[in-house]
Image (cartoon, helix red, strand yellow):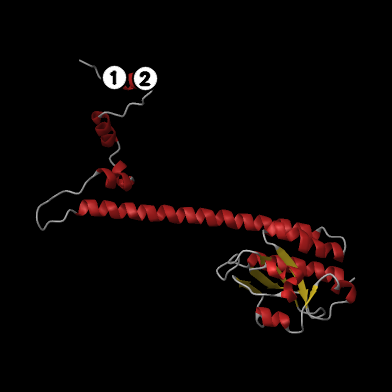
């Protein structure tokens, strides 16, 4: 007659031994809240009971409901963690973009920092500075020129930002790169009354990169830094 291996003997043989029924019972007695704290396990191992015609067993139903509630809570927690990580990544990218802009030592270098350095940092394809007429000629050669009143038409009077999930052709904003942009974010540059209205456009080749549900605080902060840099160099 074959003898039953002990747990240690089974592990030595390469196959981990499952606990015996007595061991499981002893553990549950020592941890009476285990099944309550782990309803998904209880729902799996405790079948519904047949109590006779017209009598419903609510135990199995309750356990299934608890399991569904637990799955929902886990899904919500995972989404919260993902959003927190994404927000942290966006914040770090914005800080890096600000440092790149502040390092410029001339208006030409400043504009190049915005248009060349910011796209990879912000994970977009184009960043453009767009001005209505009135910028000094020495500075106007480095930016996109818009028609008078275009900033309010694009953003809306008094509005600071606009996020567009899908855009059509916008050659006035993106010049030769117009055909590349499928979604964009537009933000008004706070320049004061001594400079013409202007905006910064961030364009992505992927539709729905920007949409109304996104926060714009970091975008507005970046626009404030860029606006400060423009005033600094153009006023010289």
Q: Position of residue 146 (x, y in %)?
A: 77, 79
Q: Image point 69% across, 69% down: which residue?
A: 179
Of all residues, the one furthest to the top in this rendering is 1
* In-front residue for pair 128/162: 128
Q: Is residue 199 visible?
A: no
Q: Is residue 133 left or right of residue 219?
A: right
- Dividing the picture into quadrants, the one containing residue 105 is bottom right
* In-front residue for pair 130/36: 130
Q: Which structural element holds mark 1?
A: loop
For disc 2, the neighbor class at 10 Å (few under 14, some 14 to 19, many from 20) is few
Q: Give the vertical position of 145 relative to 27 (above or below).
A: below
- Dividing the picture into quadrants, the one containing residue 110 is bottom right
**Mark sitting on residue 13:** 2
Q: Earlier in the sequence, mark 2 or mark 1?
A: 1
Q: Position of residue 65 (x, y in %)?
A: 29, 55
- Dividing the picture into quadrants, the one containing residue 224 is bottom right
Q: Position of residue 216 (x, y in %)?
A: 62, 68
For disc 1, the neighbor class at 10 Å (few under 14, some 14 to 19, many from 20) is few
Q: Image point 85% across, 62% down: which residue?
A: 109
Residues under labels 2 and 1: Cα distance? 10 Å
Q: Is residue 83 left or right of residue 147?
A: left
Q: Image point 81% across, 65% down: which residue?
A: 111
Q: Position of residue 187 (x, y in %)?
A: 69, 72
Q: Give the vertical position of 39 relative to 169 (above or below).
A: above
**Mark sitting on residue 5:** 1
């Amino acid at each position: 007659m074959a003898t039953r291996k002990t747990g240690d003997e089974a592990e030595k043989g390469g196959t981990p031994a499952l606990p015996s029924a007595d061991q499981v019972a002893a553990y549950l007695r020592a941890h009476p809240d285990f099944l309550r704290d782990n309803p998904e396990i209880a729902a799996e191992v405790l079948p519904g009971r047949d109590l006779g015609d017209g009598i419903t067993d609510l135990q199995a139903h309750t356990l299934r409901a608890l399991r569904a509630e637990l799955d929902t809570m886990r899904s919500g927690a995972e989404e919260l963690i993902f959003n927190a990580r994404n927000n942290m990544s966006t914040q770090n990218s914005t800080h890096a973009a600000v440092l790149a802009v502040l390092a410029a030592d001339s208006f030409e270098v400043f504009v190049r920092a915005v248009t060349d350095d910011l796209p990879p940092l912000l994970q977009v394809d184009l960043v453009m500075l767009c001005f209505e007429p009135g910028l000094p000629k020495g500075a106007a050669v480095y930016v996109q020129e818009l028609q008078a009143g275009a900033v309010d038409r694009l953003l809306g009077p008094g509005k600071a930002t606009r996020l567009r999930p899908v855009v059509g052709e916008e050659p006035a904003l993106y010049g030769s790169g117009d055909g590349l942009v499928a979604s964009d974010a537009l933000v008004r540059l706070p320049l004061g009354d001594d400079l013409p209205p202007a905006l910064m456009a961030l364009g992505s080749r992927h539709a729905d990169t920007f949409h109304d549900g996104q926060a714009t605080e970091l975008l507005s902060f970046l626009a404030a830094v860029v606006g400060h840099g423009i005033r600094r160099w153009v006023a010289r």
